[in-house]
Amino acid sequence: MPVFRTYVPESLQNYNHLVYCHSSGHAAAVDPFDANHLVNVADAQSFKLTQIWITHEHGDHIRNLSELKARTGALVFAPEACKGKFEADHWLADGDSLSIGETHAEFWYTPGHTPGHGVYYLPGKTPELICGDTLFNAGVGNTRSGNVETLFTSIKRILERCASDTRIYPGHDYLLNNLNFALSLEPNLDIALEWVRDCTQQSPETRATTTLLDEHQFNPFLRLEDPGLIKALQNSGHDTSTLLSRFTALRQLRDRW
Ligand SMILES: [Zn+2]
């Protein structure tokens, strides 16, 4: 479990993550929103921030990038498709490897939410995926500055490349809201109702994390072949002839919800 999640106060419901090495205590901060907050969290955990990893170019994911780099001297790693949007020390291409001490990760290029988006996969006994705004708990990122077909392809590739028990770490706390959207389509989806009940007992800080196995049970964007979901989309007048048309319909419905 070399990922430490922290909810960022006074943010846009952002989670930041610290990927760390047990033996050296070195850590990478992902998508720094608030440098003070991250430095305090790192101090409390006895981590030394030596790297910064960026998922994408949106302002709330690079907000305190320069400040955190100036304060820690950490090296910045970012998707090469973000070149020209901000400064980095290392630009990453799909399949590139990263290391923080003895913790290893792979960078995957996953455009769709934005043209520059990438995710960080930590393979191993308990695989973990830091997925920014590409894949959310019970949802996917919006495509207002991207493209829905590109996002569909990126999500498909993520599911093909990840072990099914991968734990996901999105960039925002949207689980409860997204579950309620799922229930607006399938009001009797028991598993989603159970998760909603649990969520109401949690705070953003204590929010449960999910695995891809969980997501396949309640994330509508991963359940494109579910007969109940297809029927709900047909009832709302959408084209459901292909997986992409169902994904696109869901994205449109979620945008208006
Ligand atoms: Zn974003």
Image (spheres, rainbow, N blue to C red):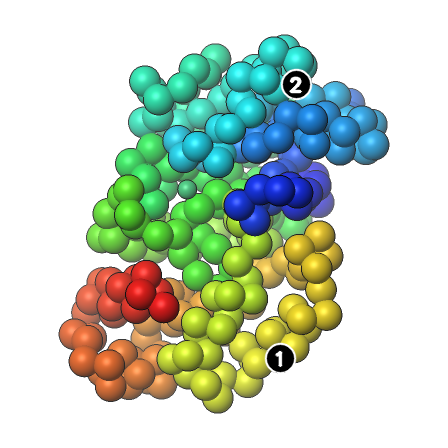
Give yes or no for contact between labels 2 and 1 (Cβ–Cβ under 8 Å).
no
| Quadrant holding the C terminus | bottom left
Q: Quadrant of ligand 1?
A: top left
Few, some or many C-alpha atoms within 10 Å of disc 2 (few <14, some 14-19, many ≥20)?
some
**Vertically, is 126 above or below 175?**
above
Residue tagged 1:
194
Nearer to us in this view, 148 or 71: 71
- Closer to the camera: disc 2 or disc 1? 1
Residue 246 appears in the picture as rendered:
yes
Amino acid type, mark 2: Thr
> Which numbered disc, 2 or 1, marks the residue that appears first in the sequence?
2
| Quadrant holding the N terminus | top right
Residues at marks 2 and 1, CA–CA distance in whole angstroms:
40 Å
Respond yes or no on whether mark 1 lies under 8 Å from ligand 1.
no
Question: Which mark, by number, is residue 50?
Answer: 2
Instruction: Return the x and y of residue 214 as percentages of the image width and height.
Output: 55, 67
Residue 256 occupies which quadrant of the picture?
bottom left
SS at mark 2 in the image:
strand
At x 62%, y 79%, the residue is 194
Few, some or many C-alpha atoms within 10 Å of disc 1 (few <14, some 14-19, many ≥20)?
few
At x 57%, y 30%, the residue is 32
Instruction: Return the x and y of residue 228 as percentages of the image width and height.
Output: 36, 85
At x 27%, y 43%, the residue is 146
Residue 68 occupies which quadrant of the picture?
top right
Amino acid type, mark 1: Glu
> As drawn, which residue projects farthest toward the bottom?
188
Instruction: Return the x and y of residue 177 as percentages of the image width and height.
Output: 51, 66
SS at mark 1 in the image:
helix
Left or right position of 6 against 133? right
